[in-house]
Image: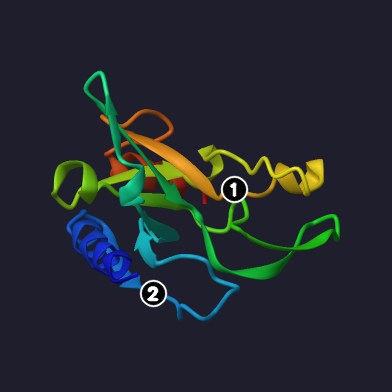
Amino acid sequence: MFFGYVGEYHLRKAIAKIPGVSNPHKFDDHDRSKKSDLVITYKGKEISIEVKSLQTNTLKEKDGILYATFQCDGSDSREVTFENGERLKTTCLKVGEFDILAVNLFMFKKKWIFAYALNSDLPRSKYKGYSEYALERLLASSMRITWPVQLPFTLDVTHLLNKIAARK
């Protein structure tokens, strides 16, 4: 848990160095209606970022590529409601609940490096207990990442910030 907060601190420092970023802030961790660890203003648009860390016991290497997984879910289950009125209790995060995912890659390189992906490009849940409608709207709770990073991840967050600002 503490490692996650340290990761958030290092991400905040890295993001603050990007020209055009202002007003970095964080919502209350106990406010389940706002799922993000960092919110910034970029080109006049509010952009939310969720931060995750690698699970150290999943780190593996094959043919010069490092692999690991990370949990991409909420720490507690909560009830979510979809546009069609369907409700369910889950720890899964909803598609669109934040703009960018930042994954702390410290365990790969022993440096504070982050890989970024758009929320909309992340894999969806495959849990058989959810309806097809829900599966299209819930993110997978466990995801894999590599070093070097592969799509949908990038090391260039500015490119993603520009995409989101243009979209908003």
Amino acid type assigned to the residue bearing label 2 in the image = Lys
Q: CA distance from mark 1 to mark 2?
A: 22 Å
Residue drawn where x is 38% and y is 37% of the image? 145
Residue in view at x 26 percent, y 62 percent = 7
Q: Is residue 128 left or right of residue 70?
A: right
- Give the position of the N terminus as an image quadrant: bottom left
Q: Secondary structure at mark 2?
A: loop
- The circle on residue 13 is none
Q: Residue 75: give x, y in percent of width and height.
A: 52, 68
Q: Residues within 10 Å of mark 2 (few under 14, many from 20)?
A: some
Q: Nearer the viewer, mark 1 or mark 2?
A: 1
Q: Position of residue 11 (x, y in %)?
A: 25, 59
What secondary structure is marked by label 1?
loop
Q: Position of residue 102 (x, y in %)?
A: 36, 51
Q: Residue at x 37, y 48 (%)?
A: 161
Q: Is 156 rendered above or below residue 99?
A: above
Q: Earlier in the sequence, mark 1 or mark 2?
A: 2
The dot on residue 26 is 2
Q: Residue at x 66, y 70 (%)?
A: 78
- Considering every residue shown, the one lying at the far front of the view is 57
Image position of 23 with respect to 110: above or below: below
Depicted 94 relative to depicted 35: above or below: above
Q: Residues within 10 Å of mark 1 (few under 14, many from 20)?
A: many
> What kind of residue is marked 1?
Leu
In this rendering, position of residue 13 left or right of residue 117: left
Q: Position of residue 143 (x, y in %)?
A: 48, 42
Determine the residue located farthest toward the top in the rendered image: 63
Badge 1 is on which residue? 139
